[in-house]
Image (spheres, rainbow, N blue to C red):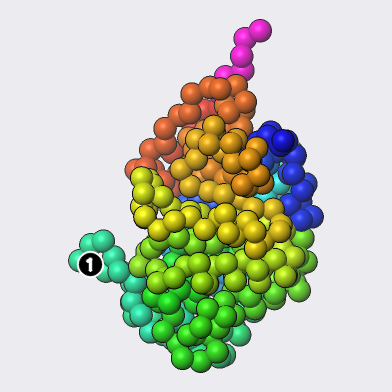
């Protein structure tokens, strides 16, 4: 049976192990969403992962309402990513760009424009001062433009040296807003039935496949439970057919972020759908959320997943795979510095000292 330390082929990407660095939203880019030199060290330090999935990276100005997050829609952004991907490759790693359109979660105080979503809804917020605005329901032209943005950013990612891309279809962002009946209130052929609600995702992924190839294309979904105000009354009815549609496209991998009752980033009693999705999707399946090393190893050995993604554990443990290999302690990250500028809480977490022989 495979272990987490065995290599795996993810479409066209040959990963040295099955320990994946999950995408992590950060804020170390410029106000114009251009990556900085600090990010070169950050990603180089974590190149021991079998695959790095980059932080959320915007596909357009309208779609990226997060301060100081990077983008992939301008030439300066593309050029600034090149030394990052080169550093990862020189360190022996592989990296894909997570393509991010935030939809109704794109803050107008950052973008200067009204957000776009499947329907004219407003995302909730945990404080009375809600920074989100009511979104504009996407027209046919808006839908076509957003799909163009995914495809164009995918091409830019390859030019920037990435090994592929992952569309962000999870956590209540634009693709997820089309998938779920709690946020998709449309009555046209992009809304209503599960088949219609899957359409935007399927078409966006197909556009990316046409642009860079199925072997370089992945996607992330979060099929169970509510996230950032996005929920569905019958997740199995939409996400299992969605997995079949992705299987038909022959993509490189599917990552699932699944919540559980005692989760640390969202909690839900909605059952996980990964066992049914495993049957519907024949490609490599990556599972994510609150895994210990032992749990991840058990799911890979048991055939329930092909790889496991860790996010926050990689923040404070740049050499996480080596710590797993040695059974070394896992350092704790500092939430206060997740989104701040500068090296603190970013590139200053030490690697495990080499064992003295």
> Would you identify the image quadrant in which residue 252 lies?
bottom right
Point 56% across, 22% down: residue: 327
Q: Is residue 227 above or below residue 341?
A: below
Q: Is residue 138 magenta?
A: no
How many callouts does the rendering have? Answer: 1
Residue that sits furthest to the top in the current view: 357
> Would you identify the image quadrant in which residue 269 lies?
bottom left
Q: Is residue 202 above or below residue 88?
A: below
Residue 295: % across, % down: 53, 36
Instruction: Give neighbour class at mark 1: few <14, some 14-19, many 20+ (Cα, 10 Å).
Output: few
Q: Is residue 52 left or right of residue 65?
A: right
Residue 28: % across, % down: 49, 51
Point 68% across, 57% down: residue: 253
Q: Is residue 115 above or below residue 24?
A: below
Point 60% across, 21% down: residue: 326
**Nearer the observer, 302 or 141:** 302
Q: Is residue 18 above or below residue 81?
A: above
User: Can you say which quadrant of the picture contains the N terminus?
Assistant: top right
Point 23% across, 62% down: residue: 127
Residue 65 in view (yes/no):
no
- Decide whether the magenta segment is chiefly helix, strand or loop: loop
- Secondary structure found at label 1: loop
Residue under circle 1? 129
Residue 319: % across, % down: 59, 31
- Point out the stretch of residues depicted in magenta: 352-357
**Nearer the observer, 140 or 248:** 248
**Nearer the observer, 107 or 15:** 15
User: Can you say which quadrant of the picture contains the C terminus?
Assistant: top right
Residue 316 in view (yes/no):
yes
Q: Is residue 353 magenta?
A: yes
């Amino acid at each position: 049976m495979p272990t987490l330390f065995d290599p795996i082929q993810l479409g066209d990407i040959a990963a040295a192990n099955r320990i994946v660095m999950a995408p992590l939203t950060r804020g170390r880019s410029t106000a114009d969403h251009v990556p900085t030199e600090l990010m070169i060290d950050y990603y180089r330090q974590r190149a021991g992962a079998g695959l790095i999935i980059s932080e959320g990276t915007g596909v357009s100005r309208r779609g990226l309402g997060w301060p100081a997050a990077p983008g992939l829609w301008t030439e300066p952004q593309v050029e600034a990513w090149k030394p990052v991907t080169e550093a990862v490759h020189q360190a022996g790693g592989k990296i894909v760009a997570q393509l991010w359109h935030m939809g109704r979660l794109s803050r107008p105080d950052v973008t200067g424009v009204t957000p776009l979503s499947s329907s004219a809804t407003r995302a909730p917020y945990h404080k009375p001062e809600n920074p989100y605005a009511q979104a504009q329901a996407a027209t046919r032209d808006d839908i076509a433009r957003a799909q163009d943005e995914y495809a164009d950013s995918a091409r830019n990612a390859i030019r920037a040296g990435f090994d592929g891309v992952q569309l962000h279809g999870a956590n209540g962002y634009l693709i997820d807003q089309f998938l779920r009946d709690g946020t998709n209130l449309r009555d046209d052929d992009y809304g209503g039935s599960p088949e219609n609600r899957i359409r935007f995702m399927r078409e966006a992924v197909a556009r990316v496949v046409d642009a860079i190839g199925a072997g370089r294309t992945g996607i992330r979904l979060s099929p169970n439970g509510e996230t950032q105000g996005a929920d569905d009354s019958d997740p199995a009815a939409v996400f299992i057919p969605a997995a079949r549609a992705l299987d038909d496209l022959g993509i490189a991998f599917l990552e699932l972020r699944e919540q559980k009752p005692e989760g640390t980033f969202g909690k839900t009693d909605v059952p996980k759908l990964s066992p049914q999705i495993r049957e519907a999707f024949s490609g490599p399946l990556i599972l994510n959320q609150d895994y210990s090393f032992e749990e991840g190893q058990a799911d890979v050995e048991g055939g329930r997943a092909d790889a496991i993604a860790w996010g926050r554990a990689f923040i404070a443990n740049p050499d996480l795979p080596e710590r797993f290999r040695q059974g070394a302690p896992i350092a704790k990250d500092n939430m206060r510095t997740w989104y701040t500028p500068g090296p603190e809480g970013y590139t200053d977490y030490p690697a495990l000292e080499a064992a003295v022989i």
